[in-house]
Image (cartoon, coloured by chain):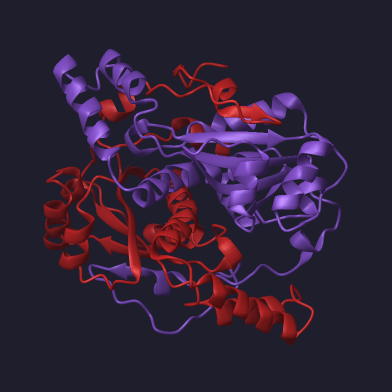
Chain colours: A purple, B red
């Protein structure tokens, strides 16, 4: 689908049809997801895709009993590694092999940089991994909708319970959940008027930052 | 542009041509950016767009002297508000007006929920705002490339110095920088072989999480 149409028609949908997602469709969606950029190309993202009823029921329990977690064909736990060094050697070796780096010394100094960055606080690492992982999450939602598959990003879940239920190692930050499925016919999620958006004039500031003190919301489909 | 082509051809580019970006093109890009989803539709994002030489020079000083910050037509400071309540009343009023909420009591309880969430730690708030703001940042990069405008996301900058230089209030988290410009002809950023990506089989885990202990990188343009 043309990107303009894609971005203008993507909605957060939590009412799904019974149509299941083909495995190769899911594969294509995740392949495109991996094309997202990330800090130093370190790709900290991991996706736990729950398709079996029992797995989705377990997720529902830690997601404040929200039904669409089970009703979705696939519910995805989006995780980000807080260990910056996890893929750094392989990544910088790739940069060297493809001519992005002039020599091995520069590669070694980049590996050292990332090792130094890895000493930052746990809080900073959570922010670091959330940043790149969310770039991939947005790409996932666009790639899904491009295949006619609607999504609903969720941050409403009990992170500690999720980690325990799914045996997530301490290194990984649960960044969000994303439910995926073909939308139910005539769902109000799509039929309802779109939720308002803050206008460009309020969110974009030229040359200096002057946040607006009031909130205006406009119809996002209007030409403004 | 078709999304498949868009996601497959988007590259991080830091060599730009002299062609300037028309104001209405920039306006269209930011309009699409605002269509990104966010937690509770709270839209914590703010964009400081630097187009004047002097502003970009100031940014370069806090961005480890990276030349492309100045060479780009527009360098964007992407900020996220850590005050969850900033837009909540207007947002839930919009939900009520459009039938997303059954009555005023539910609206009030959502406003209260967000007020409670707003008591979380500063570290948690930074992660919260980074999540939604990065979703918008990815949308911005796709919307730009859809107009033929390349981007380079950057997390390498001195956050404290940036906050001081641009008088950013304490409430706002600098999430990343994004440089924007038409790509230079024959830039190696586009001509070079794409950087490797972790394969789908390594990053997607079905039903339970079993992180791979080794890093494999594949050519992202290959059919895998």
Point 39% across, 84% down: residue: A213
Point 75% across, 68% down: residue: A192
**Does the image show residue A103?**
no
User: In the picture shown, does residue B158 fall above or below B171?
Assistant: above
Point 26% across, 55% down: residue: B74
Location of the C terminus of chain B by quadrant is top right
In the image, residue B106 lies at what x, y percent? Answer: 73, 80
Q: Is residue A173 left or right of residue B17?
A: right
User: In the picture shown, does residue B119 fall above or below A127?
Assistant: below
**Does the image show residue B198?**
yes
From the viewer's side, name the closer residue of A153 and B4. A153
In the image, residue A130 lies at what x, y percent? Answer: 45, 47
In the image, residue A193 lies at what x, y percent? Answer: 71, 70
User: In the picture shown, does residue B88 fall above or below B30?
Assistant: below
Point 48% across, 42% down: residue: A133
In the image, residue B53 lies at what x, y percent? Answer: 13, 58
Q: Is residue B169 left or right of residue B44?
A: left
Quadrant position of residue B81? bottom left
């Amino acid at each position: 689908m043309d990107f303009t149409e894609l971005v203008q028609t993507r909605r957060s949908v939590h009412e799904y049809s019974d149509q299941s997602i083909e495995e190769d469709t899911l594969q294509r969606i995740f392949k495109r997801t991996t094309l997202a950029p990330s800090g130093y190309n370190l790709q900290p993202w991991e996706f736990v895709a729950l398709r079996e009823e029992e797995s989705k029921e377990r997720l529902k329990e830690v997601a404040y009993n929200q039904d669409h977690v089970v009703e979705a064909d696939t519910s995805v736990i989006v995780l980000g590694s807080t260990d910056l060094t996890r893929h750094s050697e392989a990544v910088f070796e790739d940069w060297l092999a493809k001519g992005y780096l002039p020599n091995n010394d520069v590669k070694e100094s980049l590996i050292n940089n990332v090792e130094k960055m890895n000493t930052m606080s746990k809080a900073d690492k959570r922010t670091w991994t959330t940043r790149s992982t969310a770039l991939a999450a947005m790409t996932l939602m666009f790639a899904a909708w491009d295949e006619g598959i609607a999504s609903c990003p969720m941050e409403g879940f009990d992170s500690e319970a999720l980690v325990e239920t799914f045996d997530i190692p301490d290194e990984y930050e649960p960044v969000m959940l994303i439910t995926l499925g073909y939308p139910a016919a005539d769902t109000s999620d799509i039929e309802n008027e779109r939720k308002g958006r803050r206008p460009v004039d309020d969110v974009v500031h030229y040359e200096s930052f002057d946040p607006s003190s009031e909130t205006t919301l406009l119809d996002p489909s209007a030409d403004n």
